[in-house]
Image (tube, rainbow, N blue to C red):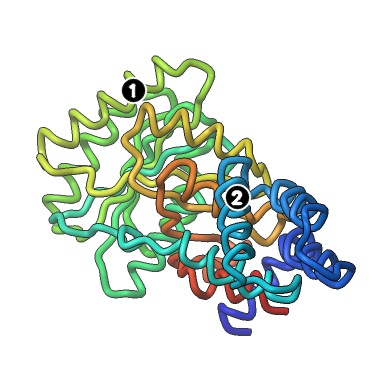
């Protein structure tokens, strides 16, 4: 099965909660009246598109109906497909790999799949011919470094780690020094996922930034926020905290295959102004790819 087929398969729950509900509404309606529009609005909100984004989409639908671009309920689905695709287009979607090494900081709360994401990213870039290293900067979660080392073996990437409870900034310092000395192309840095205290999180990330920039002034080149798609609008709440503390440059959305809330991708882009750069649609090391808006929209809207 190719990745597009796996993406369609992975989005089946979201499609049922989102696209199929719109199709059912269209099938039961004879005109684009206020009742139809209110029902459509409820479907979008239930699909975790988000209130602000839903309002924007509904405004566009109403204007298109006024201009007779939408003449009947059957015209709504093609309009939505094109409009959602336009919302998701973003020139910042590509990864910024401009350093020597390029330093990629990976942040997010515990349980969203940060360590797994680093493993899959490392494998992806190794297969592309890059020399990759990892830093086990999450020194607080039990066995985080061991988990990263397992991924390091799978991805054939060296892992720099210290003992559990060590200073994360010290791990990052050693990793940056090692990446420079060993001429790595990319260094991925794992971080602790604690959200209980925003000021502590900010201090820790500031210290990590200072350590990195002392050795590589324009790094980190990307700060990727990992979000769990199954949490829907809670992912937006998490993202707001990290955008305030971590200078996030893009999002990795994991577990799309296990959720009916994949519409959150649209909310992330619209409400937070963040590009979704990568998506995960399964457990396999290969079920992970750069996010391509057109393919996502095709998989979401086409059975």
Residue found 46% across the figure and 28% down from its top: 241
Residue 119 location, quadrant: bottom left
Residue found 63% across the figure and 80% down from its top: 5
Counting from the top left corner in percent of width and height, residue 6 is at 63, 75
Whether residue 81 sits left or right of residue 216 in the image: it is: right
Residue found 35% across the figure and 22% down from its top: 202
Q: Which mark is residue 264?
A: 2
Counting from the top left corner in percent of width and height, residue 249 is at 33, 46
In this view, the residue in front, 302 or 167, is 302
Counting from the top left corner in percent of width and height, residue 281 is at 61, 64
Q: Residues within 10 Å of mark 2 (few under 14, many from 20)?
A: many
Residue 231 location, quadrant: top right
Q: On screen, 17 above or below 179? A: below
Q: Secondary structure at mark 1?
A: helix
Q: Secondary structure at mark 2?
A: helix
In this view, the residue in front, 61 or 284, is 61
Residue position for label 1? 204
Counting from the top left corner in percent of width and height, residue 125 is at 34, 67
Q: On screen, 247 above or below 194? A: below
Q: On screen, 150 above or below 20? A: above
């Amino acid at each position: 099965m190719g990745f597009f087929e796996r993406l369609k398969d992975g989005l089946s729950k979201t499609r049922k909660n989102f696209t199929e509900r719109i199709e059912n509404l269209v099938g039961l309606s004879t005109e684009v009246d206020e009742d139809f529009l209110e029902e459509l609005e409820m479907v979008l909100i239930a699909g975790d598109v988000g209130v602000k984004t839903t309002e924007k989409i509904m405004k566009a639908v109403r204007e298109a109906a006024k201009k007779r671009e939408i003449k009947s309920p059957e015209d709504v689905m093609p309009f939505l497909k094109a409009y959602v695709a336009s919302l998701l287009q973003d020139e910042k979607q590509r990864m910024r790999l401009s350093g020597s090494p390029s330093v990629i900081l990976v942040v997010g709360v515990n349980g969203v799949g940060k360590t797994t994401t680093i493993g899959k990213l490392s494998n992806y870039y190794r297969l592309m011919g890059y020399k990759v290293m990892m830093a086990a900067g999450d020194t607080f979660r039990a066995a985080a470094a061991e988990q990263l080392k397992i991924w390091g073996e799978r991805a054939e990437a060296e892992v720099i780690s210290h003992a559990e409870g060590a200073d994360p900034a010290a791990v990052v310092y050693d990793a940056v020094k090692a990446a420079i000395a060993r001429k790595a192309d990319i260094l991925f840095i794992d971080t602790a996922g604690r959200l209980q205290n925003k000021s502590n999180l900010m201090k820790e990330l500031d210290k990590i930034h200072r350590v990195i920039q002392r050795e590589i002034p324009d790094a980190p080149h990307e700060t990727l926020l990992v979000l769990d798609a199954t949490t829907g609008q809670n992912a937006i709440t998490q993202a707001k905290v990290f955008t305030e503390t971590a200078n996030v440059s893009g999002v990795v959305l994991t577990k799309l295959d296990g959720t009916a809330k994949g519409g959150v991708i649209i909310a992330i882009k619209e409400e937070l102004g963040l590009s979704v750069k990568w998506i995960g649609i399964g457990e396999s090391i290969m079920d992970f790819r750069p996010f391509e808006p057109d393919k996502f929209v095709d998989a979401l809207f086409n059975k």
